[in-house]
Amino acid sequence: MINNNTHIVFDLDDTLYKEIEFVKSAYLYINSYIKSRYSIDLSKSIKKCLENEINFFDLINSKLNQNQIFPIEKYLELYRFHYPKIKLSDDTTFFLDKILSHNIDFSIITDGRSVSQRNKITALGLRHLAKNIIISEETGFEKPHLNNFEILNRIYTDKKLIYIADNTSKDFLAPNILKWNTICLLDNGQNIHKQNFDLEFNYLPKLKITNLKELIVL
Ligand SMILES: [Mg+2]
């Protein structure tokens, strides 16, 4: 499936890394911000927030005095624009090393804010490795719009394009329409968006995998 005639395109969140790790990083960052100002440490409760037992912002409101609480916009700003502590899994690193060593390039198409997504990509060490980084806020088009996929269609006219992603509700429709190969990385239980395969044919991936290493047949 993957050879020198292939250009691989990845989604970012819950495909190249688990988005829950970004959420954890953001909560810890907000916690350090609060701690440095009020010496209140919420870190022991963050695990419960990540397991959806408690809402993180409710937790903050319950622990801080009225005059210590920042407007919600401040927390959202910290959440979205902090530089995250996230990293690639060993399997993803192995897969990327493998394709790059065979001179197979890759790009990223992701929905989200420019600063947040670029921070994530830089933190994952992919900023200089990805040939093209296409972010919805920068182009003005979100999945499942065709636009961001057509950009790569125009660049890689002689390549077979593959989109590897996780979200069945929006990720695969456009690349399917453009006759790309589409591959879904299955949820290992940690994904933010749950996967539903009970959908119209055009929304479904051509292949499902549990690990990127399954694609290596080089
Ligand atoms: Mg995703």
Image (cartoon, helix red, strand yellow):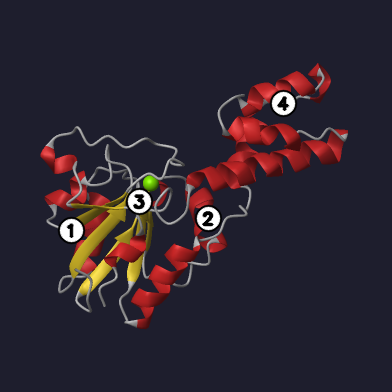
Q: Which residue is mark 4?
A: 60
* Mark 2 and mark 4: Cα distance apart in space: 25 Å
Kindly indicate whether the residue at mark 4 contacts the one at mark 1 (C-beta within 8 angstroms). Answer: no
Q: Position of residue 59 (x, y in %)?
A: 69, 24
Q: Which residue is mark 1?
A: 181
Q: Which of pointers 3 and 4 lies earlier in the amino acid sequence?
A: 4
At horizontal 42% and vertical 75% (from top left) the residue drawn is 97
Q: Is residue 162 above or below residue 144?
A: below
* Mark 1 and mark 4: Cα distance apart in space: 45 Å
In the rendered structure, which amino acid carries the disc numbered 1? Asn
Kindly indicate whether the residue at mark 3 contacts the one at mark 2 (C-beta within 8 angstroms). Answer: no
What is the crowding at mark 3: few (fewer than 14 residues within 10 Å), some, or many (at least 20)?
A: few
Pick the quarter of the image with the N terminus: bottom left
Residue 120: give its label: 2
Is residue 130 in view?
no
What is the crowding at mark 2: few (fewer than 14 residues within 10 Å), some, or many (at least 20)?
A: many
User: Which element type, helix, strand or loop, lies under badge 3?
Assistant: helix
Q: Is residue 149 left or right of residue 105?
A: left
